[in-house]
Image: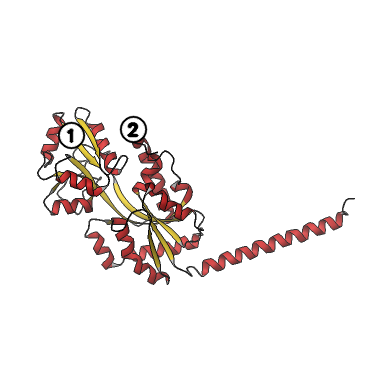
């Protein structure tokens, strides 16, 4: 037998009130959590082993972050798997701002197109917090090698010589730039020599195993200051303040060869905007500490401030930019 109409309406009205009360309670709890944020330690996940550029940067600013946020900062290194191990640590955590992840050109600009079966997608899964530093790539040769000057490089290219260029592995930033140089010089014969990371590649060029290598300004400065490497061109539209006498790739005829290494921080998609804003402010202030910034500017890094929205757009643009180039190189990681 059907429920009388007035009783049905009363039941629906009471049900709606109950749902509304639950929604208000949930909203109140969420607002309260945001207002009290942070109330426990914050984890920063790094996809590299200890001692590298990303690790050093985060550990340097962690005390400043802890002082601002009133909570300890716990740095966790989870290298391997093309950043997928580190990404999983964030993706399986709540979207509450207590676990954040370092973003950089490899994991967030290149890997989405390089890995055949990647377990994360930067735009879909993460929310930008802040851009921290960036530095342009530099093409350099060994001081005792055949590419020890810009003139020798130009002469070899014009003569159609055999040129070996190194990288930190297939699909890495140096591989992409070497491919672009080869594409612009079809008369020469280029051979890509992938190494197992930056240190072996640097050792390779010092031993004259390869003719050219691309690396960021910090790595290049170490080589040039020691007299073991010669900077040939900066892969950027403008000259670097750290290498003012070195021409840009645009100046020597390759405007398409521009690439920055960069480091930023992201949260899990769905993290409340007020928490993103709180973290953004803390990272910006930490990077503005004069002593901290001097340490990294002395290494060759530049400071670039972006809002979370701008950083999200930047990441998307990086993926779109490198996807066709990676496809052209044929580099694929299963």
Specify the quadrant of the image occupied by residue 212: top left
Where is residue 248 shown, x and y percent of the image?
A: 20, 44
Specify the quadrant of the image occupied by residue 250: top left
> What residue is shown with label 2?
328
Q: Residue furthest left?
A: 144
Q: Residues within 10 Å of mark 2 (few under 14, many from 20)?
A: few
In the foreground, 153 or 305: 153
Q: Quadrant of the C terminus?
A: top left
What kind of element bears circle 1? strand
* Vertical comparison of 68 with 331: above or below: below
Where is residue 129 shown, x and y percent of the image?
A: 42, 57
* Mark carried by residue 163: 1
> In the shown orientation, is residue 80 left or right of residue 98?
left
Marks 2 and 1: in contact by CB < 8 Å?
no
Specify the quadrant of the image occupied by residue 207: top left
Residue at coordinates 43% horizontally, 43% vertically from top-left? 118
Q: Residues within 10 Å of mark 1 (few under 14, many from 20)?
A: some
In the foreground, 45 or 289: 45
């Amino acid at each position: 037998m059907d429920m009388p109409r007035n009783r049905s309406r009363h039941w629906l009205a009471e049900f709606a009130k109950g749902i509304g009360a639950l929604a208000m309670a949930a909203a109140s709890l969420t607002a309260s959590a945001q207002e009290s944020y942070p109330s426990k330690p914050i984890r920063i996940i790094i996809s590299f082993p200890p001692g590298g550029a990303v690790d050093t940067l985060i550990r340097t600013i962690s005390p400043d972050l802890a002082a601002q946020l009133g909570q300890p900062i716990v740095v966790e290194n989870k290298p391997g798997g093309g950043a997928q191990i580190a990404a999983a640590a964030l993706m399986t955590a709540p979207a509450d701002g207590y676990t954040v992840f370092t973003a950089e050109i490899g994991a967030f600009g290149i890997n989405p197109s390089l890995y055949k079966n990647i377990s994360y997608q930067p735009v879909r899964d993460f929310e930008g917090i802040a851009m921290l530093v960036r530095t342009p790539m530099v093409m350099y040769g060994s001081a005792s090698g055949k590419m020890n000057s810009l003139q020798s490089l130009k002469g070899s290219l014009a003569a159609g010589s055999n040129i070996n260029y190194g990288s930190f592995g297939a699909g890495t930033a140096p591989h992409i730039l070497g491919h672009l140089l080869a594409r612009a010089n079809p008369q020469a014969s280029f051979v890509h020599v992938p190494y197992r990371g930056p240190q072996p590649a640097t050792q390779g060029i010092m031993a004259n195993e390869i003719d050219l290598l691309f690396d960021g300004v910090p790595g290049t400065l170490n080589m040039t200051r020691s007299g073991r490497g010669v900077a040939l061109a900066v892969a950027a539209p403008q000259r670097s303040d750290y290498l003012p006498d070195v021409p840009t790739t645009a100046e020597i005829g390759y405007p398409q060869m521009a690439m920055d290494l960069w480091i930023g921080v992201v949260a899990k998609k769905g993290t409340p905007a007020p928490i993103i804003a709180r973290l953004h402010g803390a990272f910006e202030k930490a990077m503005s500490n004069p002593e901290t910034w001097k340490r990294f500017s002395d290494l060759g890094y530049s400071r670039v401030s972006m809002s979370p929205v701008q950083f999200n757009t930047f990441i998307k643009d990086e993926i779109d930019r490198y996807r066709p180039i990676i496809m052209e190189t044929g580099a694929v990681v299963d």
